[in-house]
Image (tube, rainbow, N blue to C red):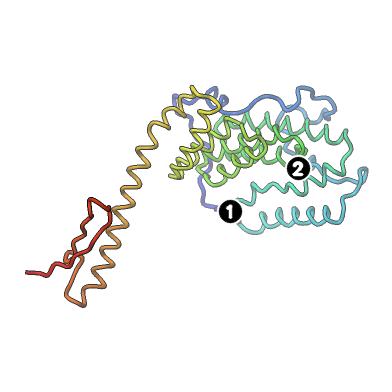
Amino acid sequence: MASGRQTATRKLPKDENAESLASELESVSLDSKEKGLNPEDGRRGSVTDKSRRPSCSSDTKGPSSKGASNKEKRSSVAEAKDDVDVPGIEWFIDEEYLKEVEKNSKPEDRQRFRELADKLKMEGNDIYTKGDFAQAAKVYSEALRTLPISHCNERAILYSNRAACFLYMEEMDEGIMDCSKALELNPNYLKAILRRAQLYEKKEKLDEALTDYKKVLELEPKNPRAIEACVRLPEQIKERNERLKAEMLGKLKDLGNMILKPFGLSTENFKVQQDPTSGSYSINLQQNK
């Protein structure tokens, strides 16, 4: 990420308190049981220790040669993040590597990773409600690198929660990608569809936003935000299209005048008429008087 970016911690508006922020997140536990966690994990502050990430350790089957390659790739990504400022690299989730980890892990290890990811998610939710969206996004990323790849619905929640951080961080492209990933994992995930619609709208991709809002209404016909957007956006899209049309015609007129100028003519010398019967157009040259 660019080094000059403002920190994504902010003071909450009067009408947007911690409770309203929390309502935007999925807070259901990935696993209500928390057995098997080390006592040193304590409360939520210690679970971001990177040494507890899933790995193909010596007490499990080693990964195939393909897995080793993916591990090296993941290592090179981490090194690149330290050495250079590459936009988006800190949010990269190497799912091929995670597939190898899950494939070569024991059931008890997979359960432990799942429980740890649950604690990370709850930690991220706490940080999010305090308005530190950049830090919350980092914790959700750590949870995504910890949770076994086969837990599709839980991973969809984490991607959607991270997208909520990106919305406030004004990282619209990353947010849209995370919502789309969540919807690959859970196609009817209402919060992810609604969040992507908001992100599209902020990117001024109004057609895509309207499509998502309509999808929301298919799943929840009385959703107030989607109802309002489906009334408002068609007119905005029409106004935008008219503005773009006018801009395009203006540019074409300027181009035509540039071509005609050496001949002592301009686009004003040509009159366009539409035949009311056929609907076709004819262009007639009008000499200057």
Tags 1 and 2 in contact by the CB under 8 Å rule?
no
Residue at horizontal 10%, vertical 69%?
288
Numbered tag placed on residue 195 in the rendering:
none
Which quadrant would residue 118 be assigned to in this image? top right
Please name the amino acid that badge 2 sits on. Lys
Check the image and report above or below for 135 versus 18: below
Circle 2 sits on which residue? 50
Q: Is residue 212 left or right of residue 79?
A: left
x and y percentages locating residue 232 in the rendered image = 38, 33
Residue 161 in the figure: left or right of residue 215? right
**Residue occupied by mark 1:** 87
Sooner in the amino-acid sequence: mark 1 or mark 2:
2
Name the amino acid, label 1: Pro
Q: Secondary structure at mark 2?
A: helix
Tell me: residue 209, above or below residue 247.
above
State whether residue 25 is above or below residue 87. above
Query: Is 279 placed left or right of 4 in the picture?
Result: left
The residue positioned 31% from the left and 47% from the top of the image is 242
Seen from the viewer's position, the closer of residues 149 and 19 is 149
Judged from the image, the secondary structure of the residue bearing numbered disc 1 is: loop
Looking at the picture, how far across and down is residue 271, in whole percent?
18, 61
Q: Position of residue 283 (x, y in %)?
A: 22, 63
